[in-house]
Amino acid sequence: MRLVNGVLAESLSLSDRAIQFGDGVFRTMKVTAGQIEFWSQHYGKLASDCARLGMTAPSEATLLADIAQLQPIDHSIKIIVTRGESVRGYVTPGDIQPNRIVQKAALPVYPATIYTEGAVLRICKTRASWQPALAGVKHLNRLENVLARREWTDPNIFDGLMLDRDGYVVEGVMSNVFALIDGVWCTPTLNDAGVAGVYRDMLLLLNGFSDICTKEAKLTLAELYSASAIFVCNSLAACVPVRQIEQHRWPVDNEWMQHIQHILGQNK
């Protein structure tokens, strides 16, 4: 079920630049018992990403009204903002008007064992491309992620890790990654590539709170493999402990995960 510019619809003009060029941004969020988790953070990210691309974001009130129309209870909500419609060519018309899509879907069902026993990851051959102008932005051109996700069919693999051109860890195909190194939860810097997720931001804000230390850092695979614990996160799955990446294994520290999840839950 979806709305296009506030009206129930299942189509978009073929001249929309989202179709032509992937010209737009999106955010996906979780709704639990009718409440949108981390709404203010999601909207802030959406507005910031729009600004990075030189687009005007829909107002918070407009998007909340759209979401209310869909009446989500326990669902995922995806908001897409496209630059709008234009004829062929990369030039942006001066009078272009953005289009917004708000859609509701069932929440993905993750096996309980990934939270209790940990998830299995793999290293992707597809690299995250270097582009500082787009780094951190959740833009619509996700072809790298599509290609990376096509690398495996094993349902036991939860996600794949993507590296940059120099071999540094960037992110998961659908998640951000944190590694516990010398008592600090480190997540890759995203100055040149990758998507800055809301869960990642919320975890970084926990630095110094209730004995949790977090920071951004450039991480090699060797440093990742030397970590005492690893987890991945996104807005739908939350924090998922990792038990194995390729041939490397880690014990799952559920106490750490429960502690972090408890603190995040208090800030939703």
Image: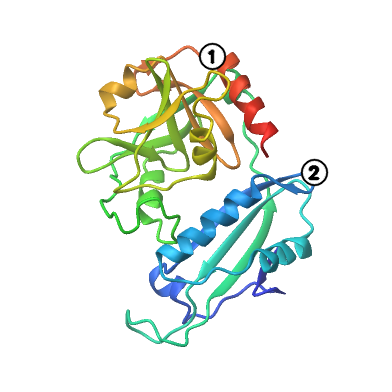
Name the residue: 34% across, 18% down.
247
Q: Earlier in the sequence, mark 1 or mark 2?
A: 2
User: Do tag 1 and tag 2 residues touch (Cβ < 8 Å)?
Assistant: no
Query: Residue 172: where, in percent of width, then height?
Result: 41, 38
Name the residue: 64% across, 75% down.
5
Identity of the amino acid at label 1?
Answer: Asp
Q: Say left or right for 56 vs 226.
A: right
Please give the label number shown on residue 57. none
Most foreground residue, 159 or 222:
222
Please give the label number shown on residue 253. 1
Q: How many marks?
A: 2
Query: Residue 186: where, in percent of width, then height?
Result: 39, 28
Q: Which secondary structure, mark 1?
A: loop
Query: Residue 42: where, in percent of width, then height?
Result: 58, 52
Residue 164 image-quadrant placement: top left
Identity of the amino acid at label 2?
Answer: Ala
Cα–Cα span, label 1 and label 2: 29 Å
Q: Which secondary structure, mark 2?
A: loop
Query: Residue 246: where, in percent of width, then height?
Result: 35, 24
Classify 97 as above or below 186: below
Name the residue: 39% across, 39% down.
171
Most foreground residue, 229 or 9:
229
Outermost residue toward the top? Answer: 251
| Residue density around tag 1, few if under 14, some if 14–19, many if 20 or more, within 10 Å | some
Task: Please give the residue where the numbered disc 2 appears in the rendered image.
Answer: 33
- Quick one: quadrant of the C terminus? top right
